[in-house]
Image: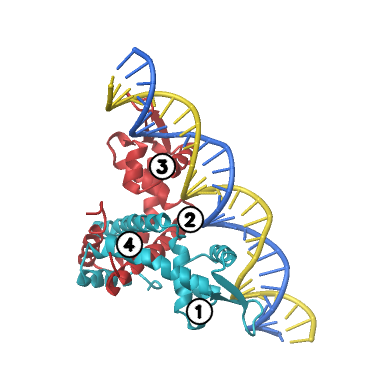
Chain colours: A cyan, B red, C blue, D yellow
DNA sequence: GATATATGAATGCACTTGCATCGAAATGTC
DNA sequence: GACATTTCGATGCAAGTGCATTCATATATC
């Protein structure tokens, strides 16, 4: 493995910077509206999309690329707010299921009313659907296991 | 501001996920080689590129999108390791200049010997220069002030 | 030129994250 | 079926981050 071409390094630097910049703006909008961070939203949405609103912590970790211990503690906080519930996993006492509550679903909806428009403002306004699809498909190539 | 088109939301989600995934792999390579995180590298490179290897904290903050207090403390740590030096800013006693040391330059070079190949492995292998340029130019549209 | 305002950097405190490890339960091996 | 190994989730502790505020100096206003 050798020197990457300049164009590749450049794309990488911009990927990180653009992500940080846009995420910063969106997080600021959410916080400004009195909402928790994107991480909370991501967990709520992940659960909401699941059958019965339930998922195992592992599934959430892998989908959202969280560390096990971070998710464990994030779920502590969310459970304390009544947004999710930990329930036993049938047939395996080590595991558990996380279930979204009514409050959790409501918070997800309310957050989307700020988050959706923020996406429009910071991304939607800046390129058309064709460009969006193109970007998504280029980014897709970066994901998944190596080789 | 209304509902963003699905293609836009999709691009946004992938932007964050791909960035996190690739950054995670690269950080793991650096750590595995006994090096500090990308944030340290970014500061070192930023200084190295500057005339005389000097930059004000503000300049670094804006370039790298760091919070003022985070950079202040990161510089504490880097200074403690002998990688940078804080020197007085001529004509303004509030301000300061951060100067990279010989050790700092050496560390940047050594880190690049791991970082560069990691970029090749996780990005370079996955698309050609044309695609890289295309990605960079799409991402460019997301950066900078709104409107 | 005295007073108010603004700017650059640091810091106390609470919260979050990373790391290593733990304990409990499941699985694999003999 | 006893014992080692693996998997799941939690946690103590150290390190990093966010927030609000601080201190010091510079600039603007009158």
Where is mark 1, residue-wise? A53
Residue A141 appears in view: no
- Mark linked to residue B31: 2
Q: CA distance from mark 3 to mark 2?
A: 25 Å
Q: How many neighbours does mark 4 have within 10 angstroms: few (below 14), some (14-19), or many (20 or more)?
A: many
The quadrant in which the N terminus of chain A is found is bottom left
Q: Which residue is labeled 3 in the image?
A: B68
Residue at the disc numbered 4: A118
Q: Are marks 3 and 4 on the same chain?
A: no
Q: Is residue B133 above or below residue B48?
A: below
Q: Nearer the viewer, residue B19 or A120?
A: A120
Whether marks 4 and 1 lie on the same chain: yes
The C terminus of chain A: image quadrant: bottom left
Label 3's element? helix
Mark 2 secondary-structure assignment = helix
Q: Is residue B134 visible?
A: yes
User: Total label count?
Assistant: 4
- Spatial separation of the CA atoms under disc 3 and disc 4: 25 Å
Q: Compare residues B140 and A51 and report the one nearer the observer.
A: A51
Q: Nearer the viewer, mark 3 or mark 4?
A: 4
Asked whether the beta carbons under mark 4 and mark 2 sit within 8 Å of each other, the answer is no
- Earlier in the chain: of badge 3 and badge 2, it is 2
The Cα–Cα distance between marks 1 and 3, rounded to whole angstroms, is 40 Å
Image position, residue A23 (x, y; %): 36, 58
């Amino acid at each position: 493995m050798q020197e990457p071409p300049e164009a590749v390094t450049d794309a990488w630097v911009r990927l990180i910077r653009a992500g940080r910049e846009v995420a910063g703006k969106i997080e600021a909008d959410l916080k400004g509206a009195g909402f928790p961070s994107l991480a909370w939203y991501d967990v709520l949405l992940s659960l909401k999309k699941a059958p019965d609103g339930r998922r195992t912590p592992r599934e959430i970790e892998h989908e959202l690329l969280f560390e096990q211990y971070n998710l464990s503690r994030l779920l502590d906080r969310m459970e304390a707010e009544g947004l999710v519930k930990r329930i036993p996993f049938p047939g395996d006492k080590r595991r558990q299921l996380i279930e979204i509550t009514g409050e959790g679903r409501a918070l997800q909806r309310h957050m989307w009313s700020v988050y959706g428009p923020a996406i429009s403002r910071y991304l939607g306004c800046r390129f058309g659907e064709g460009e969006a699809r193109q970007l998504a498909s280029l980014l897709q190539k970066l994901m998944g296991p190596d080789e």
